[in-house]
Image (cartoon, rainbow, N blue to C red):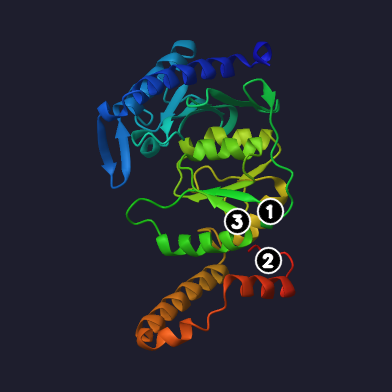
Amino acid sequence: MSSNLHPMLNVAIKAARAAGAIINRAALDVEAVRVSLKQTNDFVTEVDQNAEAAIIETLLTAYPGHGILAEESGSEHGAKDSELVWIIDPLDGTTNFIHGFPFYCVSIALSVRGKIEQAVVYDPNRNDIYSASKGRGAYVNDRRIRVSKRTRLQESLISTGFPYRPGDKLKPYLNMLGEVMSQCAGVRRPGAAALDLAYVATGNSDGFFETGLQPWDVAAGSLLVTEAGGLIGNFTGEADFMEHGECVAANPRIYGQLVATLGKYSKFAGAGDKATVRQTLRDAAEQTGAESSNSESAAPVAAEKPTLKARKIKAQAGAPDAPF
């Protein structure tokens, strides 16, 4: 595959490896890394900044006429009016990195007139390069990758990202998470959206959803998913999702099932769906209030709760596919 790479993808891989070398050096003594706060729970380190500088230098040396959109420096580098724009996240998963939790990556994508045409996600912990060129398939290192073949959400492993900024809508998210958890085999929250999308592309997970995302979180991963035979869009299933701040990706069958569950939580959902979500949240709040006011009389009732075994038997009787 390497000799047959698109020249622009080759340069992006070189840039990703340069950033990865900086990240790996810093990871040897992560305690010494200077950390600052962009906002609550949103960290930036000198490693993010140094890795970003290395990527930008590599790309602009090769293509001085291209534009740049990068997480830490925005669009202050590169040509301002180019139709070719590199979208860069130098270290996706900074919170993981500063804790030594080995799930983070470098993400680089080339957008041509608003469409992603080249993509690289580099996992420096495993030395894995995920790459794709539009129309030419997706690869990890030299191996062609495909999304998983699972057809039922009940058997699927789904990854997500939790809201972590102040002002993020936690309650609707928890409702949405509860629905997905009850319908699938397991939910994971690894903590780096670009790598989550790469895992969907390789079939290591069957789907992914998250809100509050920026273009640099999803640009490269989105091409990996589609070139590996998957679908990606916003929660209502629209393909034009990059600026929407919400993303769902999966193999085609699981994608349809996730959209059916997530659609009503989308900011692009119809008024009826939004009203349903609001009512569900109100009911949940009232139930919580009722439970706390009845807490004194709750003890004898608790003894009558069905055991997990009883619930399982009951579920199997009513619905053989119930995901317990």
Q: CA distance from mark 1 to mark 2?
A: 10 Å
Residue 124 percent across, percent down from the top left: 48, 25
Q: Is residue 211 above or below residue 81?
A: below
Question: Could you classify mark 1 by the number of other residues whose Cα lies within 10 Å: few (under 14), some (14-19), or many (20 or more)?
Answer: some
Regarding mark 3 in the picture, which secondary structure is present there? loop
Q: Are marks 3 and 2 in contact (CB under 8 Å)?
A: no
Question: Disc 3 marks which residue?
Answer: 236
For marks 3 and 1, the one nearer the N-term is: 1
Front residue of 25 and 194? 25
Residue beneath the point at 60% across and 56% down: 236
Please name the residue that numbered disc 2 is placed on.
Answer: 322
Q: Nearer the viewer, mark 3 or mark 2?
A: 2
Residue 155: give its label: 1
Q: Is residue 109 left or right of residue 28?
A: right
Q: Earlier in the sequence, mark 3 or mark 2?
A: 3
Query: What amino acid type should be assigned to the residue bearing mark 3?
Result: Thr
Whole-percent x, y for residue 10 in the image: 57, 15
From this view, report whether residue 102 is shown above or below residue 296: above
Residue 114 shows up from this direction = no
